[in-house]
Image (tube, rainbow, N blue to C red):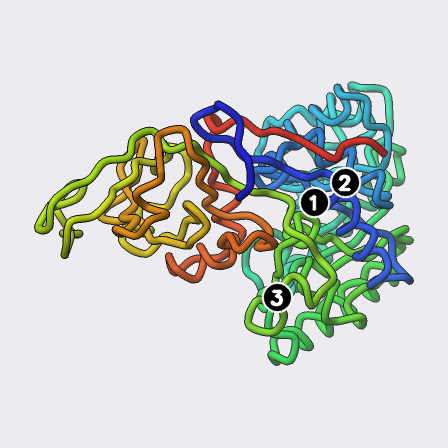
């Protein structure tokens, strides 16, 4: 059994796994640079430690959605290439320019505000223009592409910005043979060609997320942007598990049993009694709930490793706790408060994985790790490089 500390619960993050995963991603995309995406607190794993581990593994770029993530990385001393892409009017673009954060622009208003910020900061902003190739989220549509490129080139002509990248994002990269993947690449190629015809000379063209990095070399271009795979989880679970892709999950979610007790047959468990014991049995209380990121949908299905065996949550998930029916065998009768429980890990000790939780609750592994709450301490190990 994996040992746990005396904390009620903790998420243990193995930074050596992050380093090894990034090295594998670099190997899988030898013609491209690798941007490790560390948004959302490193997918719940810890922004700063995981960013450092990714750099040590060979990532020449880091990526964050919100500008605050990039500013935090700079404040912590990271000086490598860094892209921020999800902005609203009034963001601290001047602060970004001062510390050398590359900025994405999807519309002329963004170019205008970034250029104004660069003027006030006395520098030149590095800008990546985003084309919407079919995801219909960020990016300029092909119809609006010339307007965006023209605004950026006008700002570049006066020295306020330098257009260094053109990029987009795939809608269905986890199905590499889906026709949308080829179509988006074709739209992207046309957008790059049009931008170059208008005068853009991009340093990097980038389209590939984790799934495309691992399954679609034609989408690698100059830079790939893996996120989930950095943390050792498969972005294509219907095709390959993490081990088959050469990845190792970095996070394990552990807790300490708060209470163990025997109850008679017919005992209703947790709110609404959606679980009723069929026999006299041993119940264990785990001090993690939906406030900590355990999906409420995990009621009666969420897997946990306790006393050397995988059990399921019994009844509904509460805000702070879940109950597990351990049965009535010798291992269950030997359980005590203070014993360890593992909700998910890399599976090496027989524990469930984040992908097992995703399948059990009808979601994706991204959500399982990224939703772990702030009151669950992150313990980082394997950080020596």
Q: Which of pointers 2 and 1 lies earlier in the amino acid sequence?
A: 1
Instruction: Note whether residue 247 is visible.
Output: yes
Dot 2 falls on a residue whose secondary structure is strand
Q: Residues within 10 Å of mark 2 (few under 14, many from 20)?
A: many
Circle nearer the viewer, 3 or 2: 3
- Which residue sits at x=31%, y=34%? 321
- Which residue sits at x=26%, y=37%? 318
Toward which corner of the image does residue 105 lie, by quadrant?
Answer: top right
Q: Which of pointers 3 and 2 lies earlier in the amino acid sequence?
A: 2
Q: Are marks 2 and 1 in contact (CB under 8 Å)?
A: yes
Q: Is residue 104 left or right of residue 59?
A: left
Q: Residue furthest left?
A: 266
**Quarter in which the C terminus is drawn:** top right
Taking depth in this image into account, of 59 and 19 the one nearest to the observer is 19
How far from the left and from the top, in percent, is residue 262? 20, 40
Taking depth in this image into account, of 12 and 358 the one nearest to the observer is 12
Q: Which of pointers 3 and 1 lies earlier in the amino acid sequence?
A: 1
Q: Circle 2 sits on which residue?
A: 62
How far from the left and from the top, in percent, is residue 337? 35, 30
Q: Is residue 331 above or below residue 87?
A: below
Dot 3 falls on a residue whose secondary structure is loop
Q: CA distance from mark 3 to mark 2?
A: 25 Å
Give the number of marks. Answer: 3
Q: Circle 1 sits on which residue?
A: 37
Q: Residues within 10 Å of mark 3 (few under 14, many from 20)?
A: some
Q: Residues within 10 Å of mark 1 (few under 14, many from 20)?
A: many
- Which residue sits at x=42%, y=46%? 307
- Which residue sits at x=75%, y=46%? 36
Q: Residue furthest front?
A: 330
Q: Is residue 319 left or right of residue 142?
A: left
Q: Circle 3 sits on which residue?
A: 241
């Amino acid at each position: 059994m994996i040992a746990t500390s005396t904390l009620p619960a903790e998420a243990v993050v193995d930074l050596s796994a992050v380093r090894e995963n990034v090295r594998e991603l670099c190997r899988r995309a030898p013609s491209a640079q690798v941007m490790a995406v560390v948004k959302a607190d490193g997918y719940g794993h810890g922004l700063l430690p995981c960013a450092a581990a990714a750099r040590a593994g060979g990532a020449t770029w880091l990526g964050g959605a919100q500008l605050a993530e990039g500013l935090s990385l700079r404040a912590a001393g990271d000086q490598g290439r860094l892209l921020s892409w999800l902005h609203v009017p009034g963001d601290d673009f001047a602060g970004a320019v001062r510390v050398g954060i590359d900025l994405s622009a999807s519309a002329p208003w963004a170019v205008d505000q970034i250029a104004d910020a660069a003027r006030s900061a006395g520098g030149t902003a590095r800008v990546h223009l985003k084309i919407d190739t079919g995801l219909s989220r960020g990016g300029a549509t092909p119809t609006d592409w010339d307007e965006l490129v023209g605004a950026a080139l006008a700002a570049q002509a006066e020295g306020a910005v330098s257009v260094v990248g053109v990029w987009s994002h795939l809608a269905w990269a986890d199905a590499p043979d889906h026709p949308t993947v080829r179509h988006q690449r074709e739209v992207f190629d046309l957008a790059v060609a049009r931008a170059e015809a208008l005068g853009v000379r991009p340093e990097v063209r980038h389209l590939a997320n984790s799934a495309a990095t691992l399954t679609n070399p034609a989408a690698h271009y100059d830079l790939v942007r893996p996120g989930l795979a950095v943390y050792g989880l498969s972005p294509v679970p219907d095709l390959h598990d993490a081990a088959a892709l050469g990845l190792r999950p970095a996070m394990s979610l552990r807790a300490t049993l708060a209470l163990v007790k025997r109850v008679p047959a017919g005992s209703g468990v947790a709110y609404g009694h959606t679980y009723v014991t069929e026999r006299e049995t041993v119940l264990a209380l785990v001090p993690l709930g939906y406030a900590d990121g355990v999906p409420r949908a995990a009621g009666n299905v969420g897997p946990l490793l306790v006393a050397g065996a995988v059990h399921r949550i019994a009844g509904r998930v509460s805000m702070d706790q879940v109950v597990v029916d351990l049965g009535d065998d010798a291992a269950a009768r030997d359980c005590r408060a203070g014993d360890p429980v593992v909700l998910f890990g890399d599976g090496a000790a027989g524990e469930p994985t984040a992908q097992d939780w995703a399948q059990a609750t009808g979601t994706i592994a991204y959500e399982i790790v990224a939703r772990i709450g702030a009151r669950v301490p992150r313990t980082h190990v394997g950080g020596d490089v």
